[in-house]
């Protein structure tokens, strides 16, 4: 697949669809003229066209026909409708060259996508239509995300390289098995919410201690950002770094004693396990 001639189609003009379009252009992976975005919301499409210069359409089947790579950036509850629109034009699926389908719909298994796209075509066409499932997270909106990906039986190394290049424009990428996707969803997919929850609590504490909201926010955000930088640059486990900050009889120890008494660490682990279980239920 010639990178310079590659057409990338994005079904869905929401936050993640926009994140893909913006990252592809900013990283020079694709030119605006080679990106198509589809959605039922014409106002939203006009916004993306004005902002990024991409091509837009309200026809998913048309986008699929024109694209070499199709990114399904839609909510899980509407993905099947979009897939049926694509499969409704049988000529769309009788492929003579490879076309990649990338799904970021949370909880939607590869077999569900296959059941629609592969249902009416034979193996000679199916082999040209690899499906790659991806779980990104919202920091991708600021090019600081992490995405996990897994491919189906028709995926070859070149396909994964292309997907990796696209995803890397928004952050880091790892390859996993599909049976690990529920854990990925719980840890990194939902993970930003856990950090926001901690930030919310720290800010509320700052305000309770007498700071105005802006000052509390500055102290909180800068502390969280600095702590992550330390984790990445010191090359030491978080437990070691935590101990370095915790002087016997000091302020940090007083705070950690309360957290331990209330089993905060155990509760966080339990919460993430609950998220994984719910992801499994939703994808059943």
Image (cartoon, helix red, strand yellow):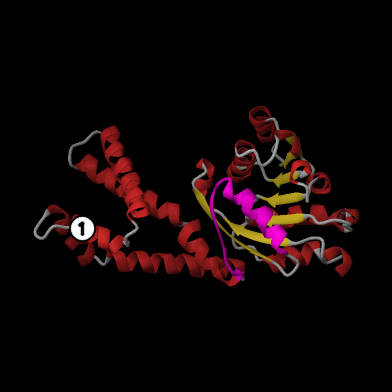
Task: Answer few, some or many: residues within 10 Å of disc 1's Cα (few below 14, many 20 plus, some between 14 and 19).
Answer: few
Q: Is residue 201 above or below residue 57?
A: below
Of 190 and 98, the residue lying toward us? 98
Of 172 and 3, the residue lying toward us? 3
Q: In this view, does 121 lie above or below 33?
A: below
Image-based side of 232 in relation to 256, left or right: right
Say if the magenta span includes residue 15: no
Q: Can residue 122 be seen in this view?
A: no
Residue 175, position in %: x, y? Answer: 58, 63
Image-based side of 7 in relation to 144, left or right: right
Which residue appears at 63% of the width and 50% of the height? 165
Instruction: Give the mark count.
Output: 1
Q: Is residue 45 visible?
A: yes
**Which residue was labeled with disc 1?**
244
Circle 1: element type: helix
Residue 252, position in %: x, y? Answer: 17, 55
Boundaries of the magenta span = 156-178
Residue 136, position in %: x, y? Answer: 56, 54
Say if the magenta span includes residue 168: yes
Tell me the quarter of the picture where residue 12 sits.
Answer: top right
Image-based side of 261 in relation to 277, left or right: left
Which residue appears at 68% of the width and 66% of the height? 110
Quarter the C terminus occupies: bottom right
Residue 137, position in %: x, y? Answer: 52, 52
């Amino acid at each position: 697949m010639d990178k310079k001639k590659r057409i990338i189609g994005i079904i869905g003009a929401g936050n993640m669809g926009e994140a893909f379009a913006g990252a592809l252009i900013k990283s020079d992976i694709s030119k605006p003229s080679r990106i198509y975005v589809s959605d039922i919301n014409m106002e939203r499409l006009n916004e993306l066209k004005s902002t990024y210069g991409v091509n837009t359409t309200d026809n998913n089947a048309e986008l699929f026909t024109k694209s070499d790579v199709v990114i399904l950036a839609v909510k899980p509850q509407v993905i099947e409708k979009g897939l049926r629109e694509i499969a409704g034009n049988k000529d769309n699926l009788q492929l003579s060259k490879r076309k990649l389908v990338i799904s970021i719909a949370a909880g939607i298994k590869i077999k569900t996508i296959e059941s629609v796209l592969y249902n009416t075509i034979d193996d000679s066409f199916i082999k040209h239509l690899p499906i790659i499932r991806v779980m990104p997270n919202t920091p991708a909106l600021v090019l600081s995300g992490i995405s996990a990906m897994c491919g189906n039986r028709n995926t070859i190394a070149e396909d994964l390289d292309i997907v990796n290049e696209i995803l890397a424009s928004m952050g880091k990428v790892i390859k996993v098995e599909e049976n690990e996707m529920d854990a990925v969803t719980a840890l990194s997919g939902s993970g930003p919410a856990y950090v926001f929850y901690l930030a919310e609590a720290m800010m509320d504490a700052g305000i309770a201690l007498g700071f105005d909201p802006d000052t509390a926010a500055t102290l909180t955000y800068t502390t969280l950002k600095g702590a992550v930088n330390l984790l990445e640059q010191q090359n030491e486990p978080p437990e070691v770094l935590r101990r370095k900050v915790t002087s016997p009889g000091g302020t940090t120890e007083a705070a950690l004693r309360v957290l331990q008494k209330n089993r905060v660490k155990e509760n966080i682990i339990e919460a993430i396990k609950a998220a994984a279980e719910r992801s499994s239920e939703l994808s059943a």
